[in-house]
Each structure stands twice: as C-alpha cells, then as structure tokens.
Amino acid sequence: MGIRPYPGQVGDGRTYEIRTYGCQMNAHDSERVAGLLEDAGYERAPAGETPDLVVFNTCAVRENAAGRLYGNLGQLLPAKKAHKGMQIAVGGCLAQMERERITARAPWVDVVYGTHNIGALPRLLEQARQRREAQVEFEETLATFPSLLPARRASAYSAWVSISVGCNNTCTFCIVPALRGRERDRRPGDILEEIGQLVSDGVIEVTLLGQNVNSYGAEFGDRLAFGKLLRACGEIEGLERVRFTSPHPRDFTDDVISAMADTPNVMPSLHMPLQSGSDAVLKAMRRAYRRDRYLAILDNVRARLPHAAITTDIIVGFPGETEGDFLDTLDVAARARFASAFTFQYSIRAGTPAATMDGQVPADVVQDRYERLVALIEEIATEENEKQDGATVEVLVAEGEGRKDAATHRMSGRARDNRLVHFVPAAGEPDASSASGAAPRPGDIVTTRITHAAPHHLIADGAPLDVRRTRAGDAWQARTRAAAVAPAAAAAAPVLLGMPAIRG
C-alpha cells in the first residue's frame, strides 16, 4: 500500500498528464508522481484531450534544458488560458536547479517542487488552487524515500526498482549530485520485498536503478552489498530477468562480476560508462579510474561472461581535450568493442567545475570529433551485431520498442543481452498462430533465429521457434482489457528495458 500525501486529499476526478525528460531515474520518478496523483483522486487524461494538470518532470543534464522547458511552458500558455482551472507543475532536476526562477520567467506555472519532496506535489497543487498563487517548495535533503510513495507502473511486465538515490561522486561535468544529494541506500530487505510484490503482480524483469548502483551499501558500510543483492534476486521465484544501471568503473569489483556469472537471471549485459579514453581527461573529469583499469574490467567481465553485450557513455570535447586525447578515446572504443554507445558533445552546465575550466574546445572541433566517434561506434556495433547472424535468441516481447512494427508486420523486444530484436511473430500475418500455437503478447518470451544485423538492432524474419506465454503476458493482457473498458484510468505507456533514455 502506498502512503497518502495527507489525509482527505481529493483530486475530484481531475485529469493529468506527465511529460518526462531524461534518464530512467526520472522515468521511475514519473511512475511515483502518477501513483501519488491517482492516490489523490486524479485520473490519467485520455489521449488527445486537454488535461486539467500537466506535470513536467525535468532533466538538467541535456543541453539547453532550461531553454526547452521555458519553450514548452510558453507553448502551453494558450491551452491554460482556454482551459479553466488548468494547472501546471514543474519538478525534477531542472526544477531543483532553477527554483524560483521558473515562476519568475513563467508566472502561469502553479507548482514548482524539487527532487527531494516528490510526495508534496498533491498538497502543493491543492494549496495553489485554494490560494490562487504559485507554490514553490524544496527540501535540501530527501523528505521521503521515493520507493515509499505509491506508483503507477508504466509496464505490466518490466519494472524499475530504485536501490539508492543521490551520488557521492564529484565528476566535474555532472550537476546531478548537487541536485539529488548524497547517496542514500535502501535496506536490502525493502528492495527484495518490492521486487517480490512486483513479481506477484506479473512482472518478470526488473532493472535496479541508482546513480551509481555498484556503490550500493556505502551508507550502511557493506562494500559487497551490491553483489549480494544480485545473488538474492536470483532466489526470487518467477523473476526471470535482472538488469542494473548504471555502475561506475571505480567501484566495479570482481564480486559483482562473479554474482553476474553465477546468478542465472542476471542478464549478460553491462552498461559501463567510459566518458573518455584519455587518462589526462579522466583526471580532469575526476573519474577516479584510468583507461587500463577500465579495459581490465571489460576483460574480466568477458572472461566470466563471454557473450555479454557491453555498452557505454562517452563525452567528446571536454575542456582541455586535445586531438591526442580524442585519439586515445577512439583507441579504447576500438579495443572495447562496444555493442552500442551513448555519445555526447560536451556542453557547459552552470554550477559544475568544468563550466569554468580553461581550454573550452571550439564547437566545430567538438562536432568533428563527435562525428568521427559515432562513425567508429556504428562500425564496431555493426560488426558485433553481425556475429549474431544465425544465433538463436530469447526475446522478451515489448510494447512500443519498434516504431515501424505496424508497417513491417514485426514485433520487437530485447534479447537476454539487451540487444533490440525486431522479429516476425508468426509464419504469416502478425496475429496468426505461432510455432507454439499462440500469438505472442508483450511480456511473453519468443525464441527466434537472427537473420540480419544492423548497427542498432537485430532482425529475425523467420517464424518463431517457440512462443512461451508467461504470467507477464497475462498481466499485460489483463491491463489491455481494462484499458478497453476505462482507457483514461488504465492506459499504459511503453517502457524502456534496461537502457538509459538520454541520447547525445
């Protein structure tokens, strides 16, 4: 049971829409916001209808994030003027950073709240309605651990589970620790209890979330806690897939690799941020590891998990980066053989140490390096994906992963190593009977053979070898049927399975 924000609060059937920007942590926060609102009597707005409430869950990492927010708020002003009683709320990392500047620049915003007091949103909305003035409220430390708040999960079959919030690192390019605070760890029993409840509801895949998941345990003094948590997830009956994001190379230890290798439901995929292949740049970034240490981690992972797909984050154009530094990054990328990478052009983030560093790299140089890096990453990713030709893979069928599925008569999902697979659901029309006599549903497991590779996905154009109907598929089907009866209350958004949402 979720906790109510305060007794007697009622949304009076008002409708809401949440617009989410940024990483999976933000997406999971939006699930909590939705849970809070529905617990308070709000209803999800039907598609195409103007909602009574629009909540912006913002990100401060993306370039020009503030400009985009104010542009979106400006576009919403005419709708607010035309829709009597409409409210606008702004939360998330950018709200934590901008604070009172939001209502100063956009006085039609009703509520601004921070990353530490999500649970206050329904109360602040009611206060804004009654007082007819904007409510701006922030906490400097976490008021309530978000996982104690009610949640409206975006997926019936796959779920995010937060194991910690905040970050103790001091990377010079990153504003997140200043906005989300120091690391706070949940107790292992609370995490496992939440996962157990999700599994009983039909979920078969969870992704463990933290700003630095493998430093989990720092708050209660157990540096091996994350590996123990992975092993404990392996004991949960009915939990078929466990993923996590994102680790930090500094804290990534051999016990975690052993836990991954020894625990069958921990998937053979790893997102390991590199950021730069230059030791000089890594030092300037305060990343607390060097290129040789990073490559040694990948070697150790592949020694225990030979078929693991490894992905990464890379920033080009960090202040002071020389052509030689950039070539070091290309060298590490070539040696690491990443399955994919999220690549970013460095841009100044106010409030970070890097913002005032000497040696800011000209934009045209950054763009040139970025294009060269992307070309190399795509070449390697294509070569790595081509090795999957003819391979038999198990795909967790997803909802909303394949944008062209309707046109191609395919469905989509993630293989165990997290590669995106577009597959033909049956020998014939997509809704025809499959090899096992049942059409696959989101949440079901399809076994199929890869017939073609591209840089960002795999294709399986033969009929499935098997379709295993799962409790997760049953849960998706039940939710879909409920949505047909009451679409405003039951509609579910697509879910990303185990990968960051931010792209450069």
Image (spheres, rainbow, N blue to C red):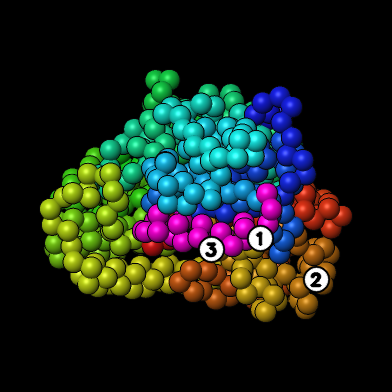
Q: Nearer the viewer, residue 91 or 318?
A: 91
- Are the residues tagged 1 and 3 within 8 Å (C-beta)? no
Q: Main secondary structure of the magenta part?
A: helix
In this rendering, the label closer to the viewer, 3 or 2: 3
Q: Which mark is residue 431?
A: 2
What residue is drawn where x is 74% and y is 27%? 8
Q: Nearer the viewer, residue 26 or 243?
A: 26
- Numbered disc 2: secondary structure: loop
Residue 20, image x, y percentages:
54, 52
Q: Which range is magenta?
A: 62-85
Which residue carries the number 3 mark? Answer: 75
For the view shown, which residue lies furthest in the top direction? 220
Residue 57, image x, y percentages:
52, 48
Residue 279, image x, y percentages:
17, 50
Q: Nearer the viewer, residue 253 or 83?
A: 83
Quadrant for the N terminus, please. Answer: top right
Which residue carries the number 1 mark? Answer: 82
Label located before the other in sequence (3 or 2): 3
Residue 81 lies in the magenta-colored region: yes
For the view shown, which residue lies furthest in the front direction? 132
Can residue 378 be seen here? The reply is: yes
Q: Amino acid at mark 2?
A: Asp
